[in-house]
Every structure is written in structure tokens, then in C-alpha cells.
Amino acid sequence: MTFLPIVERELRVASRKRSTFWVRIIAALTALVISAGFLILSRIGWGLGAATMGKALFSTLTWLTLAAALSAGLFFTSDCLSEEKREGTLGFLFLTDLRGYDVVVGKLLATSLRGFYALLALLPILAIALLMGGVTGAQFWKTALALVNALFFSLAVGLFVSAISRDSQKALAVTVLLLVLLVAIGPGADAILAEVNQRNFNPALSLSSPGYLFVAAGVWGKNPFWLGLLVNQAMAWLSLGATCLLLPRTWQEKAASSSTRKASQTHAWKFGGAKRHAALHRKLIDVNPVLWLACRERWQSALFWLITLLVAGGTVAIFVGVNRSTGWLVWSSLGGALTLVLYLGIASQAGRFLVEARRGGLIELLLATPLTVLQIVQGQWRALLRMFGPPVALWLAAQLLGQVMLQRMTWSRFNPPPVASTVATGTTSPVASATNSALVIMTNSTMVTTTTTTATATTVVSFGPISGSATLVAMAIAIAGTLTTAANLVALCWFGMWMGMTSKNTSLATLNTIVFVQVIPWFAVSFTSGIAMALLMVMPGIRNVASTTQMMIWYPLITSGLSDLLFVAKDIAFVIWSRRKLYGEFRERAGRSMVPIRSELPPPLPPTSTPPPIAPN
């Protein structure tokens, strides 16, 4: 028998997929565009050396690559084994003499091919930072090794969750939770211990975090990088080993007699009791049958309510607490991550119902009824509003409150004299060195502008009393950011529904929705607005005004306003395009099989043998 036969087959299939080629090309093109932007900024003449821009370029590309590597387990492996369970094809493999490691290693190599090729395509572009300076060869190779480790770690965790799951959305949620805990709980525990014991940070539990390993790869001096790499690899291989042991024992469906109580509890958690089911049926079935079908499960809405209440309570606790500087750090660190989790959950739920309805044939049955395409699509849209509208509204209110209070409370104790000073800060963090950032802080009588560059110094410029319009500027920025988040959510819902009609599983629909609606436009908008503002600031007429108080007020307003305007325009375009595709091609997409059947001509009939001619008498 061939050693690891599934590996050979899966690699052959994956190598022929167009996505294997295009993911590598798109990753390289994205890195080239970002590099070109940094090279343009280095030639503008802001007084920043090539080494500083090289370090900023390296930090930007590597942090983005780390985020992509850690998310590989969410979209590539979290549903690869559970999908085989739902389709009933996994059991056929174990009818042969295959073992668990044959299936697990085959799936691992097949799903990691796209991510590994994309990472290889990025390494030559990352080496541009070596030529620009600011990055040593040891930092480059350690960071590359840390990125490969993060990719393997994420894929292994996704496989482990997929081996013990059957539902795609639950597998995705558990994978997100497990990755967040494994990445953050170690450094967080070490930071708490250091704060309690009043001592320096000692990376003990942090060695299990691929995020800390990535940070340690770019730090100067001695650090436990190799020990952390060993711990990370041990945890990843233990996850793979546990997957190989559990998979042959978890693919079967348990008998109904042995798990009746557990099944009833699971059903009650998902759909509620009989009273709730009957009340929901009476309330929604006459309004729209699709609305009732999509709203039957309640655990997604309950989970969103739980996370939203935690966010709202945390926002109030942060800004009411005594140590407001710590509150600023927590808000700036967790605000973006929590928003990404919200985007991921909405994108997953938007396409889930339509994907499962297509796979089970429910869409074809609905189209055979008097329901129109408009009623089916509107039923799914209204279901999303019913389940997630109230918690999302509370989430947006907490976000708006946090952004407004951030300007008025976090820095209210600072009131420096109207001078400009430079404060040495030592080595900047990888996040701070990724890009230049400007924060306008409004107080009752003074506006303070803090500009943090990628160098090892922070310039603090303060001006005298300004008009009350500064507070209105801060309010306008906060409101615009909240409206942009709401527009992004609407675009994710509509485009996610269209991806549900065109994708073969929920993970692929979620990945396409996040990439096309958020990731690619974020790169485009950030690059466009950054280059436009950089060119605007170096214009001869603007350069002379850039140091005045009014320019310090208008710069963040113009920057955020331009970005928010581009994001909202993008969202409107996605909503209009998705609605047109859903209403125009719904029946055509519903009639297509999940696996396209190739029409082939029947084989030709074998030639008939003709009897020999009879000779005349």
C-alpha cells in the first residue's frame, strides 16, 4: 500500500485548483502595492530616512501576514472534517484500511497549500526592507519562521475543532474562541502577574502564544524565541495527534436511544421549548415563511447578546474607572478586534441559511410554492434584522460612546503649555512603528496634537485656547466612524446572502464575504487616502499652513472624512450590486447543483462484426 495515499491525492487536487494560483498572485500583488506606497512616501521628503521607512514597511507587511496566517484555520480547516461528517463521506474512508493520521495529514497538506504558497510569495517582497535598512537579517528570518509557525498552529487548531464538530458555524465560533485564547491568554496572564507582583514582564506562559513568538522575533537583544518556537510546535503537534486519535471515534452518529436526553437538551438550546416554538410559528409564519425558518434557531442571537453586553459593560467600566490611561490602552487594543469578530459573525450568519437550504433542496421546494424571489430574499433579510438588529444597535451605541468619551475623558488631565517638545520613547512597538498616527485630543480650553512617528521619538505639540468647534470635530469623527461600521454591516449582510447562493459551504461564503467587502476595500481605501493626504501635505501652499492650529484641526477631520466617505460609497455599491444579483439570478443559482455535473457523450457502441459474403454458386 502507498504511504499516505490521501496526501498524494489531495495534493494533486489542490495543485489543480485555480484558487491555489490566484491566492499566491493576489498576496504578492497586495504586498507590491503596499511596498510601492511606502517607497513613494520615502521619496516625498518628510525627513524620514530609508531605514525608518524600511522598518515601517516590514512591520506593516508582517503584521498583516500574521493576521492572515492566524485566520487560515478559520476558513480552511475548521469545517473540512465536519463537512465530511455531514455529507456522510468520512465513514467510507474508514471502511478501508486507512487510519486517522492518513485522513488528517491529507486534509492538513491540502488546506495548507494555498496559505503556504502565499507566504512564500511574500518573502521576497519582505526582503525589500532589508535593502532599505532598519531590519537585520536575523529579524527577517526569525519573523519568517514565526509566520510559518502561526500558519501551522492555526491550521492544527482548526483541524482539532473540526474533528469534534458537525455544525459549520459552531466549528467556526469555537475555532475563533480557541485561537483568541491561545494567542492572548498567555501574554495577558504574564502581564497581570507582573502588575500584581510589581516586577518586570517575565514571558513564562507567553511562550505558548504564536503572537508573542512573532513579537519576540523582531525584538533586539536576547529573548526566548527558540524556546517559544519549541513550545508552539509541541502544542500544534499535540493538537494534530489528538485529532488523529479522535477522528475515527467521532465521525459516527450516536444512537438515538443512548443520547435522547442530550439530544433533547441540544434541541431546547437551539430552538427553545415547545411554547416558544409555537408562539414563534403563530407570529411569523403568516408574515413570511422564510422569516420563520431563518429565525427558529436562537443560539446565534443569544451569543451576540452576550458579547454585546460584555462590550457595553466593558466600555462603561473602562471610562468610569479610576485609571483612565489603562482604559485607553484597552480600548485601542480591543476595539478593532471586537469589531472584526462582529463582522465575522454577521458574514457567517448572512450566508449560512441559503447555503444549507441549497444543499438540502429547500430552495427548490420554496420556489415551487407561491412564494416569490422577492419574498424569499426579504424573509432572510428581515430574519437577520430580527435576530441581530437589537444587539448590533447596542454595540454601535457603545462604540459611539467609547469614541466620544475617549476624546473628552481619557486625556482630560493633560494640559501642557503651548510649546513644542520632543520626548524620547526608546524602541517603538511593532504596531506603532507600522504607520504614522495622529491623535487630536480636545480639552476644555486647549487642543493637544500628538504625532507619533516610526522613529524613536514622540513630538508633542500643544496650542493655546481654541474655539469650541474642536469638540464638534471630535463628535463628527466619532459619529462618522459609527455610521461607517453600520454601513459595513449592511453590506456584509447583502453580499453574504449572495455568497450563500454561489458558495458550496458556509466557510467559503464567509471567507469571500470578508475578503471582498472588508479586506480588499480596506487596502484600497487606506492606500488611496494615505497617498492623497501625503501628497496634499507636501504641496507648497499647504506645507506653510500645516504647522498652524487650524490645520491641526482640519487634518484628522479630512483624513477620517475621506476614508469614511470612500467606505460608505463602497458599501452602497456592494448593497446595490448584491440586491440586483439576488433578485435577477436567484432562480438560476437555485437550479444549479452544488457539484456541477459535466455532460458527457455516451461511449460509442462496439463495432458489429459483419458476416462474410456468400460466394455465388
Image (tube, rainbow, N blue to C red):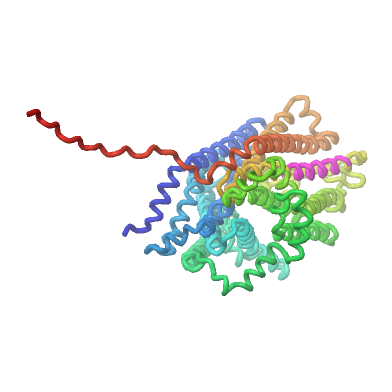
Q: Is residue 544 left or right of residue 40?
A: right
Give coordinates of residue 480: x percent, y percent.
Answer: 80, 41
Q: Residue drawn 57% across and 74% down?
A: 257
Give coordinates of residue 533: x percent, y percent.
Answer: 72, 32
Relative depth, front residue between 488 and 581: 581
Residue 418 against residue 543 in the figure, above or below: below
Residue 149 visible, this angle: no
Q: Which residues are magenta?
A: 472-488
Relative depth, front residue between 115 and 212: 115
Q: Residue drawn 72% across and 50% down?
A: 289
User: Does 227 appear in magenta?
Assistant: no
Residue 465 against residue 405 in the figure, above or below: above
* Residue that protrudes farthest toward the top in the picture: 541
Q: Is residue 270 left or right of residue 316?
A: left
Relative depth, front residue between 143 and 351: 351
User: Does 485 appear in magenta?
Assistant: yes
The quarter of the displayed image where residue 191 is located: bottom right
